[in-house]
Image: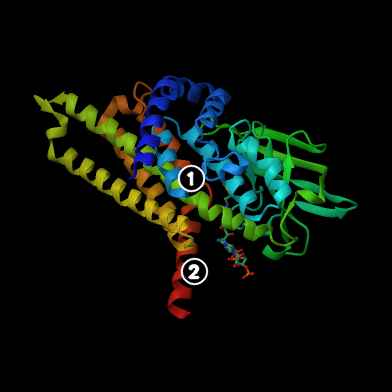
Amino acid sequence: MNQMQTEIISQLQKFRLDKIEPFAESDDEEKKFRMEIFNELGNLGFTGMMVPEEYDGAGMGLYDSCLALEEIAKSSVAHAITISVSNMVQSIILAGGSEEQKKEFLPPLAKGQEIGAFCLSESSSGSDAASLLTTAKKVEGGYRLNGSKMWISSAGIAKTYVVMARTGGEGASGISAFILRDGMEGFSYGKKENKMGWRASPTREVIFDNCFVPEKNRILEEGKGFKVAMAGLDKGRISVASIAVGLAQRSLDEAVRYSLDRKQFKQAIFDFQGLQFMMADMATEIEASRLLVHHAAGLFDTGNSNQKLSSMAKLKATDTCMKVTTDAVQVLGGVGYTSEYPVERFMRDAKVLQIVEGTNQIQRVVIARNLKKEYRG
Ligand code: COS
């Protein structure tokens, strides 16, 4: 790690311990998102990490961004995921947006004044994203959107939404991507989900009722929306993986510390080999996941993006996170299952990491398809 990266981590460690950690438990219980924390992270340059400075971003790489998200996730997956999804929206606009779109939409997102949300899933199209039903009908000067999107992270608190809608026929090639803004006529929010984890990050349905979107808000040409979404997810999945590494690391920290203090049968429970082996496996799996995440992110930063490795990082890190957080609860025993210690929250927060941005079954589909291509040509 270079000096700048070490500084990112120590600055964020201080920030999360001072500003996030004290409220993490109560915000989870009350399902409270604190916009002021997001704004402050923006002031420090952590909400637009990969956006160039000309659009008010920090001009960092995906690797740097993963280090930052790993650190934030040690105290709050809810805040880390809000930044990660907003980053994905920015990277989509940066990669496919016109100069006008970049100038209009990127600066408030990059500075952390606003949040971005990504709208792909629908009630009948989750894993099979290309079957989405929301329509965008061409009208004079733009499009009329009708339909709804489900399980949208930051819906209601975000201002800028990247929305995939059907402008053409069936399948992936009939989908286009649009930038929508909170407050547009015909744009509203449905029910807020009551979730097992990530409770401080709102998840809601987004509804389009004859919502007019000007033509200038379409990203790239008609029919490119699915590719825009998939390319965004290639990066997003690495970010989700880095969040999983942070959450797993914090859970291991809690388990080791507790087991060194807790005495049973006249010795620290850490000294029982059964628990030592468990924690040795936790530490090894976390390190392996971290290396895979760093490798995948590093490839992106050198212009060698690799869809297979992105899916591998997401699969490995989030499955590891589920196992490690579950084992951390086991190490703490009875108190681990109560909110007296944070590991029960960590276990709840881990589960959806295996589901979002493509379930881990979909990651295996992507990996297998790439293997087939490599071996069959
Ligand atoms: N980058 C750029 N283009 C991509 C791409 C990527 N990562 N992945 C696929 N494409 C392109 C393909 O090359 C293909 O283009 P051509 O028709 O020009 O060859 C097109 O997109 C369709 O791809 P494909 O045939 O693979 O689409 P499928 O319907 O089979 O879907 C999966 C592929 C299952 C991988 C996709 O639907 C998926 O990722 N599903 C999960 C959705 C998801 O992650 N949802 C979470 C939402 S955020 S919580």
Instruction: Please name whichever residue, 239 or 166, is drawn nearer the observer in this view of the structure.
Output: 239
Q: Residue at x 41, y 57 (%)?
A: 312
Let me know if residue 69 appears in the view.
Answer: yes
Does residue 260 lie above or below 307 as drawn? above
Inspect the image, locate mark 1, and give the three-letter code of the amino acid beneath it. Answer: Met
* Quadrant location of the N terminus in the rendered image: top left
Instruction: Please name whichever residue, 313 or 301, is drawn nearer the observer in this view of the structure.
Output: 301
Residue with the most extreme front position: 54
Inspect the image, locate mark 2, and give the three-letter code of the amino acid beneath it. Answer: Arg
- Disc 2 vs disc 1: Cβ atoms closer than 8 Å? no
- Label 2 CB less than 8 angstroms from ligand 1: yes
Q: Quadrant of residue 229 in the image?
A: bottom right
Q: Position of residue 245 (x, y in %)?
A: 37, 43
Q: Residue at x 32, y 28 (%)?
A: 336
Does residue 131 lie above or below 114 as drawn? below
N-terminal of the two: label 2 or label 1? Answer: 1
Q: Position of residue 223 (x, y in %)?
A: 72, 62
Badge 1 is on which residue? 60
